[in-house]
Structures are given as C-alpha cells and as structure tokens.
Image: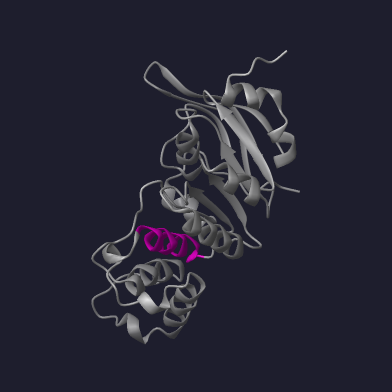
Amino acid sequence: MTAAIQVNAVEKSFGNVQIIRDLNLSVAKGERHAIIGPNGAGKSTTFNLISGHIKPTSGEIRLNGEVTSGLRPFEINRRGLSRSFQVTNVFARMTVWENVRCAVLWATGHRYAFWKNVDTLPEVKQRTAQILDEIHLSHRRDVPAGLLTYAEQRELEIGITIAGGASVIMLDEPTAGMSHAETERAVALIRRLTEGRTLVIVEHDMSVVFGLADRISVLVYGHIIASGTPEEIRGNPKVKEAYLGEEVD
C-alpha cells in the first residue's frame, strides 16, 4: 500500500549548518504517528519540510505517492495535507464562526468577491456549523478568537486544520501549555476528529504520545534513530540514551 507520507534521504542545511541529515520516514495511511526527540532535534524543521514551508537541500518527499518536495504550501494543501503550528495561528479580531468559515470557503472552492454574500451559501454554513459543534465551540461562535482561552484557541486551530477535509493532518505540539484537564480534552478531540485520517504529531508530553500514537519515530540531531510501536520505543536502548543519557552497550 502507498504510504500517506514518504520521506526518502532528505537533508536540509542552512548555510554550512546541517539541520536534517539522511531523514527517512514512512507514515501509513490511517496511522497516528508521533515524532519525538530532544529540543533542537529538528522536529519543527521536519514538519516544515513535509508541508512545504521550506525546501529540502536534497532528497524526496511524497504525499500519497505523489512527489511534493519543492511544491509550495498551498499546493501541498490542495493535495490533501493540512497542518497547525506551534504558535496559535488564528485571526484574533474575527469571530470563531468567521475563522472556521474562512477555511471552509477555501476548501469548498469559493473565493472572496465583493458581490458575494457568503451567508447565502448553504453548504458553507452547514459545514461551518458542523465543525464548531465537533470542536465544542458552538456556544462561542460570535466571540472574537482573540478573546478565547488558550485551550479554546488551540481547539479552534484544530477545527480550522480539519475544515478542508484533508486526508493527512499534521499537528505541531497541540497540547503545549495546557493543564492536565485541558490536555485530556484536547487528546479526546484529536482522536475523534482524526478518525479515518492520517495524523502526524509532534508533542513533548509523553503521556499524550504514548496514549495517542500507533507508531513513534525518534528524531535526534536531524536523523531518525528509531521507529516502532509505543512498546518498542519505550524499551529501545538508543531512545533511552538520547533522552536519559544512558550508555548503550
């Protein structure tokens, strides 16, 4: 079966500094795959490479079998990949409803035009309402996004990410800064909204990683040192060395 994401021998340098080296990663369709690693390992750079925000120095990236390395982010998005960012990325002055509707409009092929009244588009209205219900923000629909709590803003961003119906969802530290209760709610939301989709997640909270992921890849100094099930990764001596400084025989 063709992988949802296939990264082959990718390298990325900024000047003389090599950040990603001989990166190989395969994410199966429908899999929840976590990328973990120490600070500075290159996790966000890997996300940016896959989503097209930066281009690889060498190597190849495929999305559902199609080469996407070198394409621009919006071109990759149109091929079925959507992502969130570490820093919450919403339109603070627009309402919750308007934020989600913007994503739905783009996904349904509508473009902004001064002669159009978007409130008369029933499919957009229905899809927007459905997403707000799914992320439990219907009661906050008329609130400017900048006035939401931090956890609600992250939920809104997840809603925007899935609004286009992408088959591959990438979430960059979606629970960072949340309390334990907020994290549990976010994980339940992510699990439900990504059902039937491929999920790639970068996350520092190991309880989230081991509770959510089907497979885990460990990135150290821009190179994946191990990939496997949570049980395999938990017992991998190379992973213990990378995180705990334990010496490998």
Taking the image as shown, residue 71 lies to the left or right of residue 111, namely right
Q: Position of residue 225 (x, y in %)?
A: 64, 26
Taking the image as shown, residue 208 lies to the left or right of residue 110, namely right
Q: Position of residue 54 (x, y in %)?
A: 41, 37
Write the residue at 30% across / 77% down.
Answer: 142
- Quadrant of res 143: bottom left
In magenta segment, residue 121: no
Write the residue at 43% across / 76% down.
Answer: 128
Colour pattern:
one colour
Write the residue at 59% across / 52% down.
Answer: 199
In magenta segment, residue 151: yes
Q: Main secondary structure of the magenta part?
A: helix
Taking the image as shown, residue 202 lies to the left or right of residue 64, namely left
Q: Position of residue 219 (x, y in %)?
A: 57, 30
Question: Which residues lie in the magenta part?
Answer: 150-164
Residue 204 versus residue 22 in the image, above or below: below
- Quadrant of res 8: top right
**How many marks overall?**
0
Q: Position of residue 164 (x, y in %)?
A: 49, 65
Residue 205 versus residue 17 in the image, above or below: below
Residue 229 visible: no
Write the residue at 47% across / 51% down.
Answer: 175
Residue 231 visible: yes
Quarter in which the C terminus is drawn: top right
- Quadrant of res 230: top right
Residue 59 versus residue 93 in the image, above or below: above
